[in-house]
Amino acid sequence: MSNGLNGCGEVVDLPISNTHHMAVLQAQDSSHTISLNKLARCGDLYGASAPMQQLFQMIGKVAPTSANVLIAGESGTGKELVAQAIHQLSREQEQPFVALNCSAVSPQLIEAELFGHERGSFTGAVRMQKGCFERADGGTLFLDEVTEMSLDMQVKLLRVLETSRFCRIGAEEETEVKVRVIAATNRDPVEAMKSGILRSDLFYRLSVFPLDLPPLRERGEDIRLLAGLFLDQLNEEDGRNRVFSKASWRLLNEYNWPGNVRELKNVVHRAYIMADHELDLLPAVNPNRSMVSEQIGDCVTVQLGSKLADAEQRLIYATLGHCGGNKTLTAEVLGVSLKTLYNRLNEYQAKLFLGDVIPHARPYGTQSRNQ
């Protein structure tokens, strides 16, 4: 089937439209021959690794039920895609699927977004508006970043989950709905509950069936398979035949991918735009850095007045590129330990991708990340 799911809710193999990438992968890295035919598909999720195969099986088991699901995983791991796959495999697949990002709605407006409002119930309410629960009646409501919801709002959400009834703002009568709720968070939900960010009663109501999404760095060969898939899609759209450089293939598994699958897809797209034939992922991983243009041959030039930390960063990235992404060789050339090099690279990644994260809102899973 086109959505990668069969009638029994089992994952089926991903159909490959052509053998272009099989040839490319063999030619580019003969020591690690990879076949895209290994990829399995569940909705719009792809994976061949053991963690993803287990996730697909769990989706297939919970989807036909009416159980609420709580999805935990770092940003970019595909939490909404999991919710969509569950809905597609449910008995209510023909009914609405409504998604709301709780962190993107102000606390003053989220009640109206969820439950709707009557005309004239507040300034600007010029007409009656149905909320997410009402629009999702009979189907699935996906609440992303549910731990960003205020505690007062969590109490109101809990009541709807318990009674299936709510009032639009300004209404006198309650509305009854039948909605399956799938919630998601990029925090560790247990830690969020212990710290008081997530109410314990709401946690237990939502996590009838908890799902943990693996970060990309723990998915092994999926990184290279997904990169090949994304490149294949871009080549097919443009009618081109671009390939990854050998250094890029090495970089794929050595980079930590803090932004997960979303970051990988964006990096491949950026590198594809900049490439003539071979894609170079290093500058695409760090698009805001100027060290690439400042490297001439085997030399790196640093402008007088530059901060020492910036100069060190340019030298490390330039050496890493010169060594083809080999971190062990890079550490030897720079005269530092491999641990020191990893610490520096993790610091640069954190500044680039996680610099805008509030300290107390640490993304789920980062506390256990290997340094």
Image: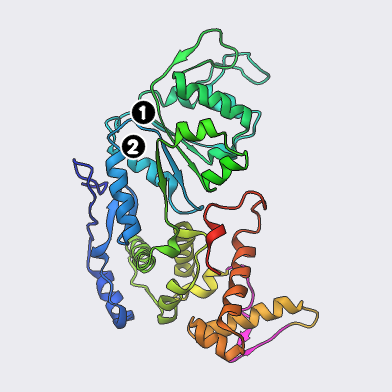
Image point 57% across, 37% down: which residue? 198
* Secondary structure type for disc 2: helix
Q: In terms of sequence position, does the residue under pointer 1 or pointer 2 come before the other?
A: 2
The residue where tag 1 is placed is 139
Q: Which residues are magenta?
A: 287-302
Residue 327's disc number: none
Image point 50% across, 68% down: which residue? 256
The image quarter in which residue 170 lies: top right
Image point 37% across, 66% down: which residue? 231
Q: Which residue is at the front of the view, 208 or 278?
A: 208
Reply above or below: 66 against 367: above
Reply above or below: 327 against 38: below
Mark 1 to mark 2: distance in Å? 8 Å
Q: Which residue is at the front of the view, 24 or 55?
A: 55
Q: Does residue 72 belong to the magenta stretch? A: no
| Viewport quadrant of the C terminus | bottom right
Mark 2: which amino acid?
Answer: His
* Circle 1 crowding by C-alpha within 10 Å: few under 14, some 14–19, many from 20: many
On the rendered structure, is 178 left or right of 147?
Answer: left
- Look at the magenta stretch and give its main secondary structure: loop
Measured as percent of width and height from the top left, residue 365 is found at 52, 55
Q: Does residue 288 belong to the magenta stretch? A: yes
Measured as percent of width and height from the top left, residue 281 is found at 48, 73
Question: Residue furthest toward the right?
Answer: 305
Mark 1: which amino acid?
Answer: Gly
Residue 87's disc number: 2
Measured as percent of width and height from the top left, residue 147 is found at 56, 39
Reply above or below: 142 against 28: above
Image point 57% across, 58% down: which residue? 367
